């Protein structure tokens, strides 16, 4: 399990990274923390001709709050964001999700934007971004565009990013007063990818439920506040709409069961 | 911007266990292989090579990371610590290593170096952990001999010893 040969380019800024992508396009892969890309290189699932290391790009390492959002730049590690002293007030859902995300040894090097760009359907950060209605900023040499999470995620490991673009930053909306959040996950072992992950936000007006690990990308539903059999009916409909399939980790029926039961438990806790 | 061509051998300089070292490798060489084959620190054990088993964990600039998920050329200029650098000299053991021996926290020893490096960083960050916190930290490592219980005991014992020593001082 060793990577196939590639040219290595270390970009010292976002400008340099998009220059390299303009030149190499599809032949190049961005390496930020490498916690998703390096396993793919080792298994030769990915064989890029050029690897562009942005981990030392000085203008890409920050995370900060700005205009109602937590803005995380491309090379900011998961550990750096997890250890923000006020993360529990800024984006409480993220603070709850991080402990489920791999292990602290992979969060020490893995990046937030890298996980978003990788778009694994079982991953925690894409789910959080989707249910929060966050945004992804894509940048190429000639333009910068901002996409909502639901437009960015397009399927299994598939996003709206074009080959000349980097995910320059992602924006998680800050918690608003009156919102309550809950993140929960069922996995084979702590830190493994989710069999089912649920992220719930309840406000005075509505319930938002996001589900990861079942469909080919995170799925979100919004309802006015519901309870009892009405809530059960909506959860059941959502569970079937996810199109769960049997695999070696869990059956489709078990996944639907988790969405219904865990979904109701979390929503009832937050509405209680 | 630094460009290193595939197939060619490049010079990589880093600090290993406090000593400046130089090795040579292709851009595709993993840090785990570089540490073992170029620099001779064979205490870096290579298990799964996709970040799951934790055997290859080393500290890079102080933080515990998978050396199989890092390119050697990415670690250029960084400070790397392996199990060989945990104690002051080759015939000494750190307090954590002594506790592992006392508590039978290893049998075949394959997973041990990675766990020691993770636990060393963890105890610096969380000097008085609960058992649950230790078990969560250990979730990033696979051990097929011990059943983990003696490992948890050894780490908690070291935390208690350090606290006692601090209280006495």
Image (tube, grey):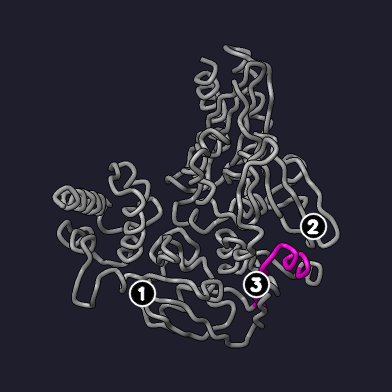
Q: Position of residue B127 (x, y in %)?
A: 29, 49
Range of magenta residues: A6-20
Instruction: Give the distance between the C-alpha atoms of the residues marked 3 and 1, in whole angstroms.
Output: 25 Å
What residue did someone put label 3 on? A10
What residue did someone put label 2 on? A162
Instruction: Give the distance between the C-alpha atoms of the residues marked 1 and 2, in whole angstroms.
Output: 42 Å
What SS does tag 1 mark? loop
Q: Position of residue B114 (x, y in %)?
A: 36, 63
Left or right of B47 in this view: A178: right
What residue did someone put label 1 on? B17
Is residue A7 rendered magenta in the image? yes
| Near-viewer residue (A223 or B108) | A223
The numbered dot on residue A199 is none
Question: Which residue, as the protein is rendered here, is positioned at the far front?
Answer: B169
What SS does tag 3 mark? strand
What SS does tag 2 mark? loop
- Between disc 1 and disc 2, the foreground one is 1
Mark 2 chain: A
Q: Position of residue A180 (x, y in %)?
A: 56, 24
Mark 2 residue crowding within 10 angstroms, few (<14) / some (14–19) / many (20+): some
| Near-viewer residue (B125 or A2) | B125
Q: Is residue A216 above or below residue B80?
A: above
């Amino acid at each position: 399990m060793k990577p196939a040969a590639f040219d290595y380019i270390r970009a010292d800024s976002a400008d340099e990274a998009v220059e390299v992508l303009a030149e190499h396009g599809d032949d190049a892969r961005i390496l930020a923390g490498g916690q998703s890309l390096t396993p793919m290189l080792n298994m030769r699932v990915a064989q890029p001709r050029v690897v562009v290391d942005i981990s030392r790009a000085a203008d890409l390492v920050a995370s900060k709050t700005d205009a109602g959002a937590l803005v995380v730049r491309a090379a900011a590690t998961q550990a750096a964001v997890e250890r923000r002293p006020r993360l529990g007030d800024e984006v409480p859902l993220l603070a709850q999700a991080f402990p489920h995300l791999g292990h602290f040894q992979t969060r020490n090097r893995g990046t937030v934007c890298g996980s978003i760009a990788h778009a694994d359907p079982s991953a925690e950060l894409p789910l959080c971004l989707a249910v929060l209605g966050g945004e992804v900023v894509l940048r190429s040499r000639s333009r910068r565009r901002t996409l909502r999470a639901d437009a960015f995620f397009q399927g299994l490991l598939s996003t709206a990013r074009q080959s000349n673009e980097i995910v320059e930053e992602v924006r998680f909306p800050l918690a608003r007063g009156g919102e309550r959040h809950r993140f929960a996950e069922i996995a084979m072992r702590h830190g493994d990818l989710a069999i089912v992950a649920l992220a719930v936000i309840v406000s005075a007006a509505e319930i938002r439920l996001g589900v990861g690990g079942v469909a080919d990308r995170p799925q979100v539903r919004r309802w006015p506040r519901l309870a009892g059999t009405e809530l059960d009916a909506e959860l059941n409909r959502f569970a079937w709409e996810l199109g769960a399939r049997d695999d070696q980790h869990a059956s489709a029926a078990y996944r639907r069961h988790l969405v219904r039961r865990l979904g109701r438990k979390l929503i009832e806790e937050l509405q209680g | 911007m630094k460009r290193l061509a595939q197939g060619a051998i490049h010079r990589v300089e880093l600090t290993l266990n406090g000593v400046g070292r130089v090795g040579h490798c292709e851009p595709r060489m993993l840090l785990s292989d570089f540490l073992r084959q170029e620099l001779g620190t064979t205490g870096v054990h290579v298990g799964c090579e996709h970040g799951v088993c934790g055997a290859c964990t080393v500290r890079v600039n102080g933080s515990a990371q998978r050396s199989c998920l890092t390119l050697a050329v990415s670690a250029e200029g960084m400070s790397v610590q392996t199990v060989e650098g945990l104690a002051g000299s080759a015939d000494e053991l750190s307090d954590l290593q002594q506790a592992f021996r006392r508590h039978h926290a290893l049998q075949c020893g394959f997973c041990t170096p990675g766990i020691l490096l993770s636990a060393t960083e963890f105890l610096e960050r969380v000097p008085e952990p609960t058992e649950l916190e230790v078990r969560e930290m250990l979730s990033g490592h696979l051990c097929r001999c011990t059943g983990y219980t003696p490992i948890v005991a050894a780490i908690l014992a070291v935390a208690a010893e350090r606290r006692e020593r601090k209280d006495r001082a």
